Amino acid sequence: MAYATTIEGTRFTFPDLRSLLAKATPERSGDQLAGLCAEGPVERLAAQIALADLPLKAFLAEELIPSEKDEVSDLIARRHDGQAFAPVASLTVGAFREWLLSPAADAAALVALAPGLTPEMVAAVSKVCRLQDLVAIAAKRPVVTRFRSTIGLPGRLATRNQPNHPTDSSAGILVSALDGLLMGSGDAVIGVNPATDSLPDYIRIVELLETLRLRLNVPTQHCCLGHVTVAIDAMAKGAPVDLVFQSVAGSQKANAGFGVDLAVLREASEAARALGRCPEGGQVMYFETGQGSALSADAHWGVDQQTMEARAYAVAREFDPLLVNTVVGFIGPEYLYNGKQIIRAGLEDHFCGKLLGLPMGVDVCYTNHADADGEDMDALLTLLCAAGVNFVITVPGADDVMLNYQSLSHHDAVFARETLGRPPAPEFEAWLREVRITDVQGRLANAPGELPPALAEASRLLPGRAA
């Protein structure tokens, strides 16, 4: 079905829904690379006008990727809840935006609506939102998850403490993890990206993190971000796995490029729950996504990268995760060229994930060959805090020495806590005060490099020190 609109006597026609969504997308290098973008701002405006006039029901009638060829499309169709969709079923995309901004769209209404929304619907409405809209609407929709800490409570900001090391050195991981804890980072997860993906290294890393957690009695969870199949093998050998991690994307072909499908993810989720480490009613899965992943795998089916990203959230939603984060600037300038595009994409991803009911975090980051810098990341972090992001990722000095990209520093988390008034998860906040990392006002209580007395024994964890 074709879609059209006229601007000052010029008629713009879009042959199908995929084309309309792609042309309506705010400018980004990935869609330019794929040849999907609008020819210029006038065609983009025309597409946005046509998209705003499109009934939401159109997304139920026209699939972007055929269900018979793609298990993600099939999942989206099977999980759509018509009764939950009913309150907005008569709206156009533009009218849906207006409703989302209205007082009627409160937290309860958005919770009830989530099963009735498809990823394509939320991607579409994000394309006709300004940044302020993306912040205002997402801020209405808290998503709370739990393991040993409670993440996503309104007014709070959790952090992933990311102690990566180029050689997976146990000492290096521990020093980095302690550095983050001393700066108050780690209530969402202490999560290591392994330099290798071998089973022995995976088991060693989770055992190391488990020792750290138990020795310090930290109310958090840990994760080795190895491949999900390695995690399954490690759990079968009795490794102390808290969270099972996997990168996911918005099409079956793209997920196959990651070496996974829905069946493997379901097996991993069931295995993690069977360990009994997570409290009843809690969550055990951790997913990571990022605009451009399907395009980079030539698995996007001619769909724009932001809509493909939203489709990845349907995969994540199927497994009730504790954490989901978009690594928004990690894939590189081929997909998000500069700071402006990264900021827009980060807010879009957070918005779409929250509307679909996901506990969204963002890795506020960029690669060193992108046209972006730390000030762009300051802006995105501040906007995300206003939008109610569940968690962000922090590394020492904002420089990940293993993955070779720029993320947030632990100091940025201190800024969010002390200046923006975003305390950590309540269990972690109480622990920080108990061990005197923070004072009663939640501010850092120690001079840089000073070890609180209660954590002095932590140095004994380091290889070569007394046990």
Image: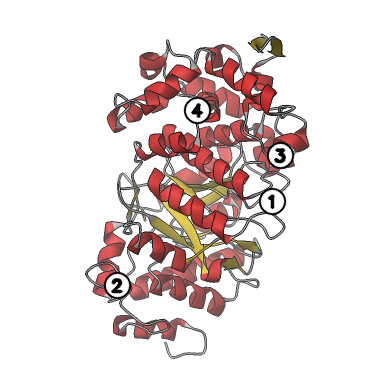
User: Between marks 4 and 3, how big is the CA–CA gap?
Assistant: 20 Å
User: Between marks 3 and 1, how big is the CA–CA gap?
Assistant: 10 Å
- Give the image quarter of residue 448: bottom left
Q: How many marks?
A: 4
Residue 91: which numbered mark, if any?
none
- Residue 49, percent from left and from top: 58, 18
Quarter containing the N terminus: top right
User: The residue under label 4 is which amino acid type?
Assistant: Val
Hey, which residue is sitting farthest left in the picture? 440
**For numbered disc 1, what is the local secondary structure?**
loop
User: The residue under label 3 is which amino acid type?
Assistant: Gly
Q: Is residue 154 above or below residue 463?
A: above
Taking the image as shown, residue 399 lies to the left or right of residue 211, namely: right
Residue 30: which numbered mark, if any?
3
Taking the image as shown, residue 237 lies to the left or right of residue 278, namely: right
Q: Residues within 10 Å of mark 3 (few under 14, many from 20)?
A: many
Q: Return the disc, 2 or 3, that comes first in the chain's sequence.
A: 3
